[in-house]
Image (cartoon, rainbow, N blue to C red):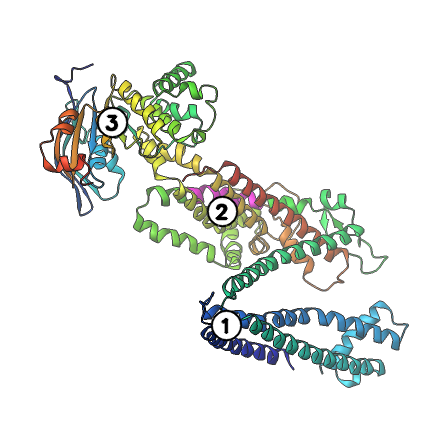
């Protein structure tokens, strides 16, 4: 039975169990003449969950685990057929078997080994499918029987259903957390492999970035340099420029919107600013590359400054514009959360509006504003598209914002675009960069959380 | 201290009206408030007593759609005159709010806030002295003198309210307005603040909005009863509480309405 057919059957069974459970508990209660503990709905849901819940989980687990098992068995089979296959040849053979099995590979390109492997694979697949169908059917019927056996007027179906929902919510959040852990672990393992090839110190403190690898052992200039400092310097510079733009503008517009603007203007202006956040970053990218960068270069030329047409300044300015809504929207929220009584208190002491804002409202809102800024920095550090298009890809170690620089994220893209072996230093370097980047943004987020919790005033 | 039989009028309201948008909150109030007395404004919720209080230091100005009519003068000077500087007015008329609202600053900075923005202390030493004097007058000095740099919000509710009183009197106002200053406090903290008011009356004119009849009777020399935006009756507290002229006032005071 195919997966979709099984799923349809399960849902059908679920619906049936629900209505059957409801009818059954009604009959039971009428016969027993006692007060029913839970409403019919809960008894029906309980039976349906019993019948469908476990089979669904098994179905999912099967989909995840059976390919691994089948692969292992196929590899074992091929190994027995021809014991002298190398690791690489084995990989090719496995891929070919599967391609031939699915019909993607014409028979002309196969040999005896591939064909017999394919036949074996077909056998395995059908055995697995049959086993799955039997297991699911048994589990579903068993669950249904179990659920029905539980039904009784005094059976506490309502808390039982509650527990199931509780578990479902827990699983959902577990998936999110486990995925994060998985990503981090894969980053860590690939990074460790990278550090087998390139020393940690060379990577973290090297001043030169030129990630090439030798195609041949005797190639001249084939040794790459994997010093990440220029990339992080570039990232920091662009982020810094972006913050120079975004923090003052974002903060001041937040103050204007929350303290000065009348409600009607605010109702229009706030969503207006938030539209900025909805513009795809690639649009910002070509805005930066095609409008801002040439404009900067030309106006630089007018006053005698040599700006390259791809510059950290252009990327930073446009990224700053992109970040404004983060800062203004979050700051606006925290400024609004400052209780009106504090403003009244300051006003009653004879403070002017701007004194009240500077000396009372902003200090009270500061933790929230700081965390808004840190979140915006995380966002700026992770931004790629604008930098690719406006700041270039040359890894210059420079403090001059008029020159072309590159960032960590851009280089990760550069490393992974194109054809190369997966375990080359060049590819693995991307993981190392990713890990360091992740650690930096993680740290920023932790600091942001700490600041908010440590300095937050409790207003009840 | 002025004799209660021959008081000096401090605040004079004539035909005060207040509208919030289309709703009229005050219908022409005529009321004189005397210097160095505690005047209690009483009445059921929504009767306009807080609105009237906020007219005195023009705190209604900050509310959108609020219009004030009539005249209100302090020491014969019209508060709503175009030439009046609101900031200066509010330095002369302090206010304590229903809920303690210390700034999220240290105790010291809370009290020093007003003197600082008005440039009242020339150097650190005189500011220190001013803070100490204000905290002492508010009866809080003994409790906080060793932790002036602690956050004002770390104090208990009653202490916070006394801190707010200290903050209000630190700018040396003529008048202190209190909008139900004890409604969020327990009886002990309330008693402390009531004592304080009696003490402060020597130097300041105090106007207090309260929902507690007993409090009004205990602390005030004069009482004004508001109902639905009208001033129903006002006079010496003793008279109001023993022989009210209006049946409505009597009903409210004796707990039949309100």
Q: Are marks 3 and 2 in contact (CB under 8 Å)?
A: no
Residue density around tag 2, few if under 14, some if 14–19, many if 20 or more, within 10 Å: some
Viewer-side label of 3, 2: 3
Image point 67% across, 62% down: which residue? A417
Q: Residue at x 34, y 18 (%)?
A: B137
Q: Which residue is mark 1?
A: A44
Q: Which mark is residue B89?
A: 3
The location of residue B167, given as percent across then percent down, is 35, 25
Query: Is residue B15 among the parts visible in the rendering?
Result: no
* Residue A161, percent from left and from top: 52, 64
In the rendered image, the vertical position of residue B205 relative to residue B80, given as above or below? above
Mark 1 and mark 2: Cα distance apart in space: 74 Å
Label 1 residue SS: helix
Q: Residue at x 18, y 48 (%)?
A: B22
Q: Which residue is mark 2?
A: A299
Name the foreground residue: A194 vs A44.
A44
The disc at residue A186 is: none
- A349 vs A439: above or below: above
Let me know if marks 1 and 2 both belong to one chain: yes
- Residue at the far bottom: name it: A107
Residue A63 image position (x, y, % from top left): 67, 71
Residue extent of the magenta highlight: A237-252
Which is in the foreground here, disc 3 or disc 1? 1
Residue B119 occupies quadrant? top left
Estimate how packed mark 1 is, as few (under 14), some (14 to 19) or many (20 or more) residues with alpha carbons within 10 Å: many
Please rate how many residues cluster around mark 3, counting C-alpha atoms within 10 Å: few if below 14, some from 14 to 19, many from 20: some
Q: Nearer the viewer, residue B250 or B200?
A: B250
Tell me the quarter of the picture where residue B200 sits: top left
Comparing marks 1 and 2, which lies closer to the viewer? 1
- Image point (61%, 44%), residue name: A443
Residue B124 included in the magenta stretch of the image: no
């Amino acid at each position: 039975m195919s997966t979709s057919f099984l799923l349809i059957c399960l849902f059908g069974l679920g619906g049936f169990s629900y209505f059957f459970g409801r009818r059954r508990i009604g009959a039971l209660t009428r016969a027993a003449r006692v007060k029913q503990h839970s409403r019919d709905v809960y008894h029906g849901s309980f039976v349906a969950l019993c019948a469908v819940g476990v089979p669904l989980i098994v179905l999912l687990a099967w989909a995840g685990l059976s390919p691994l098992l089948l692969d292992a068995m196929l590899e074992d089979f091929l190994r027995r057929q021809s014991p002298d296959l190398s690791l690489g040849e084995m990989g090719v053979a496995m891929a070919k078997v599967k391609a031939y099995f699915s019909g993607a590979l014409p028979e002309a390109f196969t040999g005896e080994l591939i064909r017999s492997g394919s036949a074996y694979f077909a056998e395995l697949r059908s055995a697995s499918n049959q086993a799955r169908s039997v297991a699911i059917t048994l589990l579903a019927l068993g669950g249904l029987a179990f659920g029905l056996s539980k039904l009784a007027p005094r059976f506490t179906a309502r808390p039982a259903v509650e527990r199931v929902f509780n578990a479902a919510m827990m699983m959902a959040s577990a998936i999110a957390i486990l995925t994060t852990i998985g990503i981090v672990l894969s980053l860590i393992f690939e990074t460790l492999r990278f550090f087998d090839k390139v020393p940690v110190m060379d990577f973290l403190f090297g001043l030169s970035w030129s990630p090439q690898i030798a195609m041949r052992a005797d190639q001249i200039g084939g040794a790459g340099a994997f010093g990440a400092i220029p990339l992080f310097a570039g990232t920091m510079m662009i982020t810094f420029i972006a913050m120079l733009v975004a923090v003052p503008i974002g903060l001041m517009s937040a103050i204007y919107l929350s303290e000065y603007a009348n409600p009607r203007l605010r109702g229009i202006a706030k969503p207006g600013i938030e539209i900025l956040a909805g513009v795809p970053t690639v649009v910002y990218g070509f805005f930066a590359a095609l409008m801002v960068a040439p404009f900067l270069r030309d106006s630089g030329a007018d006053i005698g400054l040599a700006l390259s047409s791809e510059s950290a300044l252009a990327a930073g300015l446009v990224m700053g514009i992109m970040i404004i809504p983060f800062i203004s929207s979050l700051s606006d929220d925290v400024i609004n959360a400052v209780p009106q009584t504090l403003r009244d208190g300051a006003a009653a002491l004879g403070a002017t509006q701007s004194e009240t804002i500077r000396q009372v409202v902003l200090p009270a809102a500061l933790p929230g504003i700081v965390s808004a800024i840190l979140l915006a920095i995380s966002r700026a550090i992770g931004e790629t598209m604008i930098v690719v298009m406006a700041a270039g890809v040359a890894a210059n170690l420079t403090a001059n914002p008029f020159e072309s620089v590159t960032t960590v994220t851009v280089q990760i893209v550069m490393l992974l675009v194109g054809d190369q072996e997966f375990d080359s230093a060049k590819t693995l370097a991307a993981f190392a960069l990713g890990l360091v980047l992740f650690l930096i943004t993680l740290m920023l987020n932790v600091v942001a959380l700490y600041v908010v919790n440590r300095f937050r005033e409790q207003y009840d | 201290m002025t004799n209660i039989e021959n008081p000096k009028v401090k605040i004079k309201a004539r035909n005060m009206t207040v509208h919030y948008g289309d709703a009229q909150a005050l219908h022409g109030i005529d009321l004189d408030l005397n210097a160095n007395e505690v005047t209690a404004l009483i009445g059921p919720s929504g009767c306009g007593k807080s609105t009237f209080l906020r007219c005195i230091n023009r705190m209604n100005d900050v509310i959108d759609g609020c219009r004030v009519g009539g005249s209100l003068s302090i020491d014969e000077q019209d508060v709503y005159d175009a030439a009046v500087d609101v900031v200066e007015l509010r330095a002369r008329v302090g206010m304590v709010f229903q809920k303690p609202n210390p700034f999220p600053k240290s105790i010291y900075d809370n009290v020093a806030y007003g003197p600082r923005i008005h440039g009242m202390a020339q150097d650190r030493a005189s500011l220190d002295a001013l803070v100490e004097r204000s905290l002492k007058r508010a009866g809080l000095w003994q409790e906080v003198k060793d932790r002036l740099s602690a956050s004002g919000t770390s104090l208990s509710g009653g202490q916070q309210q006394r801190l707010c009183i200290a903050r209000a009197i630190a700018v040396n106002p003529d008048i202190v307005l209190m909008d139900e200053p004890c409604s969020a406090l327990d009886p002990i903290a309330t008693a402390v603040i009531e004592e304080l008011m009696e003490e402060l009356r020597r130097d300041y004119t105090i106007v207090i909005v309260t929902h507690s009849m007993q409090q009004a009777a205990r602390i005030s020399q004069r009482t004004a009863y508001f109902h639905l935006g009208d001033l129903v009756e006002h006079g010496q507290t003793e008279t109001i509480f023993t022989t009210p002229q209006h049946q409505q006032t009597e009903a409210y005071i004796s707990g039949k309405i309100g």
